[in-house]
Image: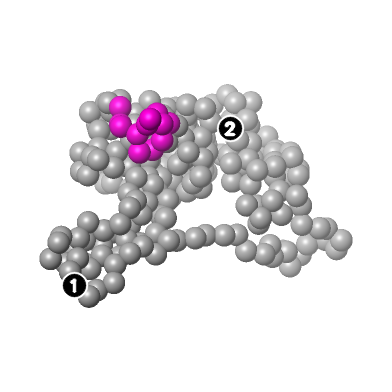
Amino acid sequence: MTDPTSPHSTPTAAPSDRSTIKRSAHHASYDRAAIDAILDAALVAHVGIVDGGQPFVLPCAFARCGDELLLHGSVASRLFRNAAATRNICVTVTLLDGMIVARSTFESSMRYRSVVVVGDARLITDHEEKRAALEALSEHLIPGRSVETRPMLDVEIRQTSVVALSLAEAAAKIGDGFSDDPDDDVALPIWAGVVPLEQHWGEPMAAPNLVDGVDVPASVEALRLR
């Protein structure tokens, strides 16, 4: 029986025409469980905007909070000034899982998990909602860290822009498996397979000006072991 929450279950209909995956549609998934799992595993999003007719794609830390993505940056940032003015943005998140090595360069590919979200950004202006959003972002990046640091200052919150983007128009694309070499290539004495990509956190490095006697906090140690 097919698991309806599996990224490889039969995709349901796309939420909108602009979020419909057309190229390699067999890799598409519109299942929210699959989409959420990818977003929750990733740390960096690339955000696309058009400013004065010129497209820009900028990297940004993010977090998923329920049915929205949260993005933050300086109030002076081109990205957030544009998002506040035009609202329409596109966010892409990608996790690279390995290289698919084929018997030809044409059939070689990658194992990956990605999500694209399009929609109208909502600028968060309420002070307490923005504080909560910034805490959610911190917890996504380093779970448990927000309670180990000093509280955010009001001036820091005012100097930060936070936008929320609904996941109503989100789509996932997942590439896995092995190369789809033609029969003539399969008969060749050329190696083919997959090289998985594994990532891990290294040993924490203390700041050179750290006060004596301060140990590595629980959140950082948990991150290293994750």
Q: Residue 185 lies in what quarter of the image?
A: bottom left
Task: State which region is magenta.
Answer: 1-12
Q: Please state if 54 lies on the left or on the right of 136 as rendered.
A: left
Residue 17: x and y, percent? 22, 28
- For marks 2 and 1, the one nearer the N-term is 2
Residue 225: x and y, percent? 66, 55
Identity of the amino acid at label 1?
Answer: Leu
| Disc 2 packing (10 Å; few <14; some 14–19; many ≥20) | many
Image quadrant occupied by the N terminus: top left
Q: Which residue is disc 2 drawn over?
A: 133
* Residue at image location 33% in from the left, 53% down from the top: 177
Q: Secondary structure at mark 2?
A: helix
Q: Secondary structure at mark 1?
A: loop
Instruction: Give how far apart the Cα atoms at labels 2 and 1 are.
Output: 55 Å
Residue 61: x and y, percent? 51, 46
As drawn, 32 above or below 57: above
* Residue at image location 87% in from the left, 61% down from the top: 213
Q: Which residue is disc 1 drawn over?
A: 188
Depth check, mark 2 against mark 1: the one in front is 1
